[in-house]
Image (cartoon, rainbow, N blue to C red):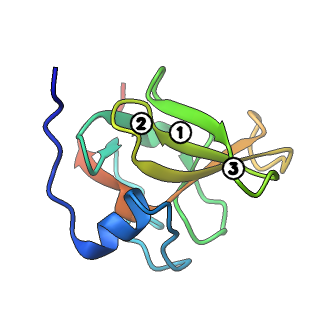
């Protein structure tokens, strides 16, 4: 079964396929506070609900929970971080950080805006 993937721009390819990082405070969703769902920019699968987004002041959109079974965790090649990718297509999203005490769940998914697309709507 083949998956229909969106044609990516050069910058989207650099981050999503090349495991790059966009500049801090640059992404379109850093300050977004609308209700809705964030989906994978490459395959369209739902990743995060806006109710789990929080202001971390780190420069990238931050979430303390993902939609179940949507995000894969892999030890990063640097040996210190955990990379997060779309569980459906493998596109690079960013990294997970724990122990920062920014929310009660004590976890931060630090996600590149360019790796996602926001779909406005009601939270569940």
The mark closer to the camera, 2 or 3, is 3
Instruction: Residue 76: give its label.
Output: 3
The mark closer to the camera, 3 or 1, is 3
Question: For the residues marked 2 and 1, what is the alpha-carbon distance in whole angstroms?
Answer: 6 Å
Callout 2 crowding tier (Cα within 10 Å): few <14, some 14–19, many ≥20: many
Residue at screen point 39% across, 58% down: 16
Where does residue 122 sit, x and y in percent of width and height?
Answer: 28, 34
Where does residue 95 sit, x and y in percent of width and height?
Answer: 63, 51
The one of 73 and 106 positioned closer to us in this rendering: 73
Question: For the residues marked 3 and 1, what is the alpha-carbon distance in whole angstroms?
Answer: 24 Å
The one of 38 and 43 positioned closer to us in this rendering: 43
Asked whether residue 31 is in view, the answer is: yes
State if disc 1 and disc 2 touch (CB < 8 Å).
yes
Query: Along the polypeptide, which appears first: circle 3 or circle 1?
Result: 1
Residue bearing the label numbered 1: 52
Looking at the rendered structure, the secondary structure element under dot 1 is helix
Instruction: Residue 74: give its label.
Output: none
Q: Quadrant of the N terminus?
A: top left
Residue at screen point 61% across, 59% down: 55
The one of 96 and 90 positioned closer to us in this rendering: 90
Asked whether residue 66 is in view, the answer is: no
Q: Is residue 36 toward the left or the right of residue 72 in the image?
A: left
Where does residue 54 sit, x and y in percent of width and height?
Answer: 58, 51
Question: For the residues marked 2 and 3, what is the alpha-carbon distance in whole angstroms?
Answer: 25 Å
Q: Is residue 81 toward the left or the right of residue 38 in the image?
A: right
Tally of marks: 3
Instruction: Residue 49: give its label.
Output: 2
């Amino acid at each position: 079964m083949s998956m229909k993937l969106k044609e990516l721009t050069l910058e989207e390819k650099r981050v999503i396929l090349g495991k790059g990082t966009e500049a801090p405070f640059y992404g379109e969703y850093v300050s977004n506070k609308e209700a809705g769902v964030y989906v994978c920019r490459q395959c369209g699968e739902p990743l995060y609900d806006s109710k789990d987004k929080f202001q971390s002041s780190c420069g990238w959109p931050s979430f303390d929970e993902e939609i179940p079974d949507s995000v894969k965790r892999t030890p990063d090649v640097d040996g210190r971080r955990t990379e997060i990718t779309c569980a459906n297509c493998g596109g690079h999203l960013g990294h997970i950080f724990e122990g920062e005490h920014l929310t009660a769940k004590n976890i931060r998914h630090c996600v590149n805006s360019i790796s996602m697309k926001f779909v406005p709507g009601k939270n569940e």
